[in-house]
Amino acid sequence: MVRAKSLPCTAVVLATLSVATSAAAQQHAPSGDELRSMYCLEVVRAEIDLQHHLISAADTAAASAATPALRQQWIDTSAELLQGLATLELVRYRLQTYMLPRIPALDSAALAIAVRQGEADFQDSRAAADRCAVECNPQTMNPPPACSAACGSESSLGRLSACYKPTWLPQ
């Protein structure tokens, strides 16, 4: 399978931000939708990177599977991940299409803060998911409060999940 390499959307956005910095006198504060879009661009970029890693791991596992049934399970998993990746790529394209023409007129510092917050929230969610997998494992029999506490905050999960269906973007 051949995968096209492209610049990460964050690199394109940050390059545009550096060009936009020269026009600082003309910049204005970004709207809530613009900040949310920058935040989500970083979240979706990170999720795409994770999907690529998971697809590679599934392909490796399929190649070394001990039985045909196990190999087929890994192939099916890889196919599901590829479908998810295609969806994420479409979301990233929509976010980029919305933001790229706006960036030169917006305060680059505020946009950079939104990008950093998206990165931090994504990393926190990955760490929470790892903790949750350990604490909520049926084998450990942890009570619900311990399990729930390990799984992260509802508000950050809500912010992240909103990125995958950006309803604020124009159709």
Image (cartoon, rainbow, N blue to C red):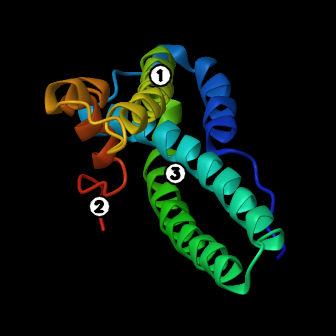
Answer left or right for 163 relative to 32. Answer: right
Q: Name the disc covering residue 96, or none.
A: 3
The amino acid marked with disc number 1 is: Ala
Q: Nearer the viewer, residue 1 or 17?
A: 1
Give the number of the mark in front: 1 or 2: 1
Amino acid type at circle 3 is Gln
- First reached walking from the N terminus: tag 1 or tag 3: 3
* Quadrant containing the C terminus in the rendered view: bottom left
For the residue labelled by badge 2, is the local secondary structure a helix, a strand or a loop?
loop
Dividing the picture into quadrants, the one containing residue 166 is bottom left
Q: SS for tag 1? A: helix
- Counting from the top left corner in percent of width and height, residue 81 is at 56, 67
| Residue at the spot of label 2 | 170
User: Closer to the camera: disc 1 or disc 3?
Assistant: 1
Residue displayed at 78% across by 73% down: 66
Q: Is residue 3 above or below residue 139?
A: below
Q: Position of residue 59 (x, y in %)?
A: 75, 67
Which class describes the residues within 10 Å of circle 3: few (<14), some (14-19), or many (20+)?
some
- Look at 43% across and 22% down and name the residue there: 117
Is residue 14 shown left or right of residue 89?
A: right
Q: Which mark is residue 102?
A: none
Vertical comparison of 104 with 107: above or below: below
Q: Position of residue 24 (x, y in %)?
A: 53, 15
Mark on residue 120?
Answer: 1
Q: Earlier in the sequence, mark 2 or mark 3?
A: 3
From the image, which quarter does the N terminus lie in? bottom right
For marks 1 and 2, the one nearer the N-term is 1
Disc 2 to disc 3, C-alpha distance: 12 Å
